[in-house]
Each structure stands twice: as C-alpha cells, then as structure tokens.
Amino acid sequence: MTVLKTSLRNFLAHKGRMALSATAVLLSVAFVCGTLVFTDTMNATFDKLFANVASDVSVGPKENDDAQQTGRPATVPASLREKLARIDGVAKVEPSADSRQLTVVDGRKKSLSPTSGAPTVGANWDEGAKKSVEITSGHEPHGPAEVVLDSDTADKHGVKTGDTLRVIAAPGDFTVKVVGIATYKTTNPGAAVFYFDTPTAQAKLLGSTDEFSGYGLTAASGVSDEQLKERVSAALGSSAGDYALRTAAESKEENKKDIGSFLDVMKYALLGFAGIAVLVGIFLIVNTFSMLVAQRTREIGLMRAIGSSRRQILRSVLVEAVLLGVVGSVLGIGGGVALAVGLMELMGSMGMKLDTSELTIKAATPIVGLAIGVLVTVLAAFLPAFKATKISPMAALRDAGTPADGKAGKVRAAIGLVLTAAGGLALAAAARSDDAAAGSGMLGLGVFLTLVGFVVVGPLLAGFVVRVISAVVLRVFGPVGRLAERNALRNPRRTGATASALMIGLALVAALSVVGSSMVASATEQLDKSVGADFIVQSENQQPLSPAVVKALKSAGHVEHVTEYTVVNAKITTPDGRSGTQRLSAVTPTYADDVRAETVEGDLKDAYAKDAMSVPEGFAKDHGVKLGDRLTVAMVDGRTAKLTVKAVTSDDTSIDKGAMYTDIATARSYLPAGKMPLDLMVLAKAADGQTKQAAAALKASVEDYPQVKVRDQSDYKKLIQDQVGQLLNMIYGLLALAIIVAVLGVVNTLALSVVERTREIGLLRAIGLSRRQMRRMIRLESVVIALFGALLGLGLGMAWGTTAQKLLALQGLGVLDIPWPTIIAVFVGSAVVGLLAALIPAFRAGRMNVLNAIATD
C-alpha cells in the first residue's frame, strides 16, 4: 500500500510531465481501436446487407476465372426456371438479371459512375431488390424506357424523376427515363445501382431474353436450406456441376469473402501504421521515465537509505507506468471510437454511406487497446525502473544524477555497429539478387537490422553527427549556439533516443519517396523507349471498350491508323508436353509499330501473320520453345488452333513483360462472335504533322462516351505520376501519426530537460544571458536534435529505397531516381518541426525567476 501511495503521489506530482507520454499512448491506442471498430462496423453492416438479400438457395453460373472478357456477365438459361419451379420444396423462383459492365450518362454527358472505384450495377427490379431498397420517390420501372436509381447516386449528381439517362452496355446503348428513386434500408456499398424491369435487363444488359444471371429459390415451409440445395442438385443431375449452388449461409460467406479481402487489407495496413506509432511512442516513454528517474535520484536514494528495497523502488516506478498506460489507454479507446466515426464519415464522402447507429464495438476492442497501452508503457518503463534500483543510497544523496555506465555504453555501441553492419550486408545482398522473392527476404532482413542497429548505435552517432550539424547550423549564433550544441551532447543516449523516434517515420517517408519516384521515372523511360503511338485510349472505369466506341475511334479524322488491343484466354500446350492457361495479347498488326517490343529471336511483325504468335523469352526457356515450333492453343469457349512461333520477345522491359502476341484476326477466327473479348485499349497514330487535329478528332469521336479517355503520352505519364502520388500521399498521411508522436517526444525531452537544468538556467541568467538568448538556446537545441533524426532517417530511408529499386529492376523498372526536392523539403521541414516543438519549453525557460531557479536543489 505504501508503494502504491508513493507511486500515486509521484504520478500526480509530475502529471504535467506525464501528459505528453500519455498523449503518445492515447494516439497509438486510438489508432488501433479506431481501426478495429471501423472494420468491425463495416463487417457487421455488410453482414446485415448480405443476410437481407440472400435467397434460401441460389442457382448461378459456375465461376470460371478463365472466361473471356466479353463485357457481358456469365448467365444461365431461362429455360431452367420451369425445371426449378417443379422441384419439391421450392416455394418460389425469382430470376435475376444484372451486370456491372455498364456506364450510365446523364443529359449533360456526365458519367454517373462512382469515382471511388465501386462498381456501376444494372439489375432487374424484383423481390430481392425490395429486400435491400425501397422506393421513396416515384414508382417501380415498367417497360423498356424506365429506370429506378439509388438515392445516393441521384443526390450526388442532381438526378430527379423525369430526367433522361443513356445506358452504355456491351449489347448496345439505350435511353431510359427516371421514374423512381430507391433508398437503401441498411447501407449503400458505394455502388451506383440502376433498376430496370426484368425483360429490359435481360435484353439490354445480358444481350438475350433467353438468359438470366441466376435464380433465387425460396424454400417451402419445413424445408431447410441444405435440404433444398440437395434436392436441386439431385433434380439437375449430371448438369448440376455446370452451376453454382449455394445456401443463404454460403452466399453470405461468399459475399463476405469478396468484401472481406478488401477490409482485411485495410485493417492490417492501418494496424501496421499503428504499430509504427506504438514503436515511436516507446522511445518517448523510455525518455520520459529515464529523465524522471534521473531527476528523482536524491529522492530514490533517500527512500533506499530509510529502508526501501530495490524491489519496492522497481515496483513504485512500474506502478507509475501502469497508471500512465491506463490513463492513456482509456482516453485512447474513446479516441478510437471517435476516429472510427470519422473514418465512416470519410467513407460516406466517397459514396459508401455507413450509419453511425450501426457502430460496432466488440468486447475484445477495449481489452486489446488497454492491453497494448499498458503493456507497451510498462515494457518501455522497465529499463529506467531497473536502473533506478541500482542507485546506491549514498551516491544518490551525494550526486545530482545517475552516473553513466561507461562499460554498458561500449557494449551498446559494439552491438549497434554489428547489427548495422549485418543489415548493410543484407541490403547489399538484396541489391545484387537475381531472384525477386529471395531478394525481398533479404531486403526485409536488412531493413530490420539497420533500423535496430541505428537505434542502438544512436548515442554513438550523436556525438559525431551533432557536432557536424552544429558546425554548419549553430556556429553562426555564437555562444548561444555553442551552449545549444553542448546541451544536445550532454546526454547522447537521450538525444539518440529522441532522434530515433523521428528517424523511423522519416526513414519510411524517404524509402517510399525513392521507390515511388523510381517507378514513375522507369515507367516514363519505358514509354519513351517503347511506345510509338501518339494516343492511348482506355476506359476510366477499367471496363472494356464497346464496339461502338472502337468504331467511332476508327472513323476519326487526321489519324494514320488505330490499333486494337485485347486479351484472349487460352490453354497452351508446348512441345515438352506441359499445358496451362495463358493470356494471349490479341492485337492488330500495327501494334508492332505502336509498341516497340525488343525480340531476341525473329521479327515481331511476323507474329501477326495468320496462325502465328510470339512467346516471351522466359517462357521459351522454361518450356524449350524455339522459333518455328507449333503450339497447340485451345481458346477458352472456342476452337483449338495450331499457332507457329514467329518471334521470341525480350523480358527486359516493364511494358507488356511476359506477353504473348497474336493477330486479333487469328483470335476471332477461332472464337464465336459472342465469346470474342472486347478491346481493352486502343492506340492511335496521328497522320504526319496533324497531331493536334488528330487529338481533337479522337476526343470528339468519343464525346458521347465520358468513361473513355483519350490521352497522349504526356497525359499518360501524368496519370502514372498522379496514381503513384495519390498512393504515397495516403501512406504519408498514415505515417504522419508516427511523426506527430515523435515530435511530442522532442517536446517532452526538452520540457523535462528544462526542469532538470533549472538551477543551471538560473545561473546562466544571473551571469547575463537574456530571456531571448535563453529561448533561442532551447530552440536551437531542438533544431539540432530534429536535424539529427532527419539526417539518420533520410539516409537510412534512401538506402532502403535504393535497394528496393534494384529489386524492381528485375521487373523492368530499372531507373533509380532520388527525389531530391522531397528529401531536401523533409530535411528543412524537420528544422521547422524542431523550432515548433521547442516553443513551449523555451517559453517556460525564459519565464523562470532567476533567484528561485538558482535556489533549486
């Protein structure tokens, strides 16, 4: 009880000093709990949605990952409906007709598709639709010219009943009038959903009134889902294997698997960044308790002198850590709920409306948050607490601080150097690796060892690096600058720990900047080197181009030629007897001019002759394929061809690496018209001297198709740069939490350092140091620590990024590009961060009463 009282007294006496450490715990726990609450809420919401729409038993087409991308969904015959209705135990059969391969355009020729990446869905209005949405304006669709859309899409784009929309689908375009607005009963999964009557959905989305997307069966009273599934399977007999039969529970699990993979990636990515913040917070807590123990050396010595045991001292400090962990964790759990609500609002702005009334807080979430916060705090505080037990009572009463352990410092330096050297060797091995998988393993090992090594050797580096930084930055400030330098060097271990917290976040920023910049530079070089076409035409929503779009592009003026590009799935049998499904790039012969693929054997133009093809270098080596060999190519959903290898392409590229080429006319000759994949991309070459006119003509030709974008090479390079930039900005935003925690560490270190040096500050003021000079000294000390951390982090990050780029070179991304503007901006920004972090500690130091400070013992 005495130990607990002492711990409580000390905790409350130093509550101001504990506040920033508690904030670090709060932020880390909030990130973890917020992620768990958010993903649990998403899972619960989608579970409810899937449960509402699932039929007792569903009958759909068998999944085929190798099916040709025709722009039309897989279907089942409409004639199956009557057979299913006759099965004993089937109370109702509800056919569905839906597709995600469509674009809907309003009267201003603006696409109504989501910009978040969610799909655009066209479906028939049936009983299944009524389970998830309800008509809140207008009426149900009747006839081929009517449509109902979801309220979120209508609100976002200002669509009202009575408006006319144009639907662009693979079977053809058609116009409809909005007759109703439907509102989701649970959640809008982010999709734009359009409901048609059943015959229209069949004819216009599936391409035939003789097909359906599937059937939903309702079980008769007393018949379980499993029993009904068995009866359906028995009734279908040998043809049951051609269909996917699922109970409601199985449909729910299948839907959960699709959305669950996305949610799992999001969950573990967020938890990974939370882990980085926790790691950075550990440095803050270690520094806090190390300085508190040093400042209470006399107090601890007195407690030892009057009979307190080492165990009691240890327990006293650890109890303070537990209190800190509990307070920070409880606040962090509340912050996590708030963060989850914020994430839900963010998803809502992107089109996925999540109701906060559905907020799901599982019992495990606060337990996990509390356990992480307390455990991390206690572990971080253990080393300072253990050192406190080694203080001699008499030495403590005689000295103002804890004496340094020179032997321990040498051992630490040796361990740090060994770890850093081992990490450097691992990075070097990764950079020289010829195998991406093995190289990635060595890269991961190198990153871990160098990071730990730099953290351990930080105090040793502080003595040298801080002097170098000071010589460049601080000497211009005269005596005040020298004082700031000496303060930063006074306790290298503390300076190293504070800088290491900042180092971790900045190392990741630098590494990702190098990788992202190198990817953009490599792709740009490959475009310049390989792409001869003037224009690249693709659909913005990653859907194939409809035949109408391709026809319009071909009719554009000022264009020398238009090249079609699609992918055909085929089972290829090689001379060594092995076979497997491959993706065959089917293109028009002008592709050889538009994309200059290097060959190691033969001429690529010959591969576009009738019944000819090319293979990549790696495939040829693995299967013993030589120029002139005839390969058996069985087109999926088509006939089998014998294609002659006319060229072997080089693997030393990132554009179309590993592609097999054949003429699109050859592919069409072996595939039925309804099974030929739609074009995924079109390339265009302008007539000589008519590039601007060709660009205008191509854009005008697809003006009615807003989902189709015509880009020249500059536009395409910018697209790549923007995509990489968006990803990096998102990652930087998540890393910002760790950097914020590191900045709190700098603030805390300076604040505690000011308290520790109270008497010294009083003496400096007494001999003539002004308040302004005092504040400047504290700020300069903070800047040096921040720049020290930045220098270590940026150097380490560039080493990681450079090594990663060497591995990317194995995939054809061979250009190393160091983004010096970003690196310099981060370094300068670190100095600014140092200045800001020192504002409060410097203000406090400048406000000290000189006499009271000198009198401090």
Image (cartoon, helix red, strand yellow):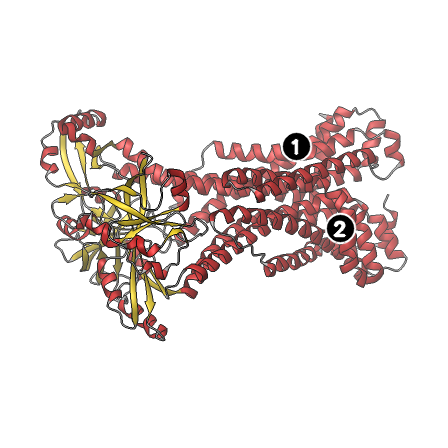
Q: Position of residue 792 (x, y in %)?
A: 68, 49
Whole-number angstrom distance, CA of label 1 to CA of label 2: 29 Å
- Mark 2 is surrounded, within 10 Å at the Cα level, by few (under 14), some (14 to 19) or many (20 or more) other residues, namely some
Residue that numbered label 2 is attached to? 465
Residue found at the far front of this picture: 628
- Front-most of residues 740 and 710: 710
- Front-most of residues 380 and 794: 794
Amino acid carrying mark 2 in the image: Val
Could you say which quadrant of the image residue 545 lies in? bottom left
Could you say which quadrant of the image residue 43 lies in? top left
Task: Look at the image and tell me whether residue 432 can be seen.
Answer: yes
Residue located at (16% from left, 31% from top): 239
Q: Position of residue 541 (x, y in %)?
A: 33, 55
Q: Which of marks 2 and 1 precedes in the sequence?
A: 1
Q: Nearer the viewer, mark 1 or mark 2?
A: 2
- Front-most of residues 523 and 820: 523
- 817 vs 59, left or right, is right
Q: Look at the picture and state if 642 lies above or below 538.
A: above
- Mark 1 is surrounded, within 10 Å at the Cα level, by few (under 14), some (14 to 19) or many (20 or more) other residues, namely some
Amino acid carrying mark 1 in the image: Leu
Residue located at (32% from left, 65% from top): 684
Question: Mark on residue 830?
Answer: none
Residue that numbered label 1 is attached to? 379
Image quadrant where one finds the N terminus: top right
